[in-house]
Amino acid sequence: MGDSRLWGKLLEVREHAKETFIWELGEGQISFWLDRWTWNGEIIQGSTSIPNPHDMVKDYWNGNQCNYTLLYNILNSEQLHLVQQTPIYPDQRDKIVIKNANSQKISSFIYQTLFHWPSVHWGTDIWGKHLTTSTSFFSWRLWLSMLPTDDILKMKGLRGLSVYFLCLMEEETLDHLFLFFKCNFSQKVWTELLTKFKMDTMNLSWSNFYNCREEWKQINLQVIPCIDAWFIWMYRNSVKYEGSTPLAKVVTTHYTSYL
């Protein structure tokens, strides 16, 4: 989504949010003049004078209610009436609440505007009980080709010498790393894993991460490619940034322990 479209959506949501949410007073640590907190959500504006725009609601309290004597001199009668109808819960924290029942529809609109994205066929596979939150998030980035491999960083203007630290044979690219498996190191990892699992993979492809999922899903092992990719990526980081020695058996050990 382009920046202009995003800002347009945010502005649209802002206008709806004004009619939807209101502050429920607790400690009174919100802006008296700028936040929406009175009974019907109106902002206290239009008064003849504003002593201090940074004043908080609690600055105009007297015990557990507003100091109406003080407010009488700075608010008109309509504004003072709204304040009088506003409940205060001094033993609680201020919190944002939905103003009325009709606002549920507006709230739904806000959610749909900001968070309703087209569904993808692989979504249920990566956000499941068999993957940790970190692994799921990594898999999501992998599916969207958003991992910071050197070729991606170059597209963002971060240029420099590039080598894939696990095999030291080619430049680091998303294609070399995860279009399973052009990298010799990744092939070694997979060979050792097959030996440990003793799985029949004759009818399973392992040449392309994005295409092999369907075949693995048929035997209810669609998370295997994601887990494999996760541990290779974590080991890549260890070798690149911590100077670890690239050993396929280390990845295999971590992978087996996880399973």
Image (cartoon, rainbow, N blue to C red):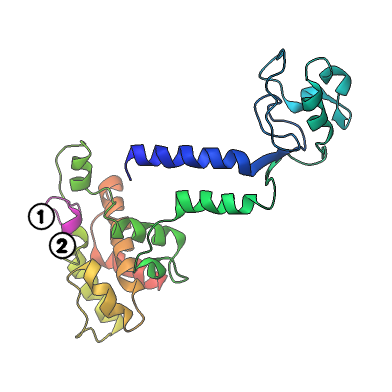
Most prominent secondary structure in the magenta stretch?
loop
Residue 239 location, x and y as percent?
A: 26, 51
Which residue was labeled with disc 2? 183
For label 1, the residue is 169
Q: Secondary structure at mark 2?
A: loop
Q: Residue furthest front?
A: 78
Q: Residues within 10 Å of mark 1 (few under 14, many from 20)?
A: few
Q: Position of residue 147 (x, y in %)?
A: 28, 51
Examine the rendered structure and indicate whether residue 203 appears above or below residue 160: below
C-alpha gap between disc 2 and disc 1: 9 Å
- Give the magenta part as a residue range: 164-176
What amino acid is at disc 1? Answer: Met
Q: Is residue 10 left or right of residue 103?
A: left
Height in image: 128 above or below 48? below
Quarter of the rendering occupied by the C terminus: bottom left
Q: Residue 206 location, x and y as percent? A: 20, 73
* Image point (45%, 64%), residue name: 132
Residue found farthest to the left: 169
- Camera-nearest residue between 171 and 27: 27
- In the foreground, 252 or 87: 87
| Sooner in the amino-acid sequence: mark 2 or mark 1 | 1
User: Which amino acid lies under the numbered mark 2 shown in the image of this protein?
Assistant: Cys
The answer to which quarter of the image holds residue 49 is top right
Q: Quadrant of residue 80?
A: top right
The answer to whether 143 is drawn above or below residue 2 in the figure is below
Location of residue 30 in the rendering, given as x and y in whole percent from the top left corner = 69, 30
Q: Residue at x 84, y 18 (%)?
A: 72
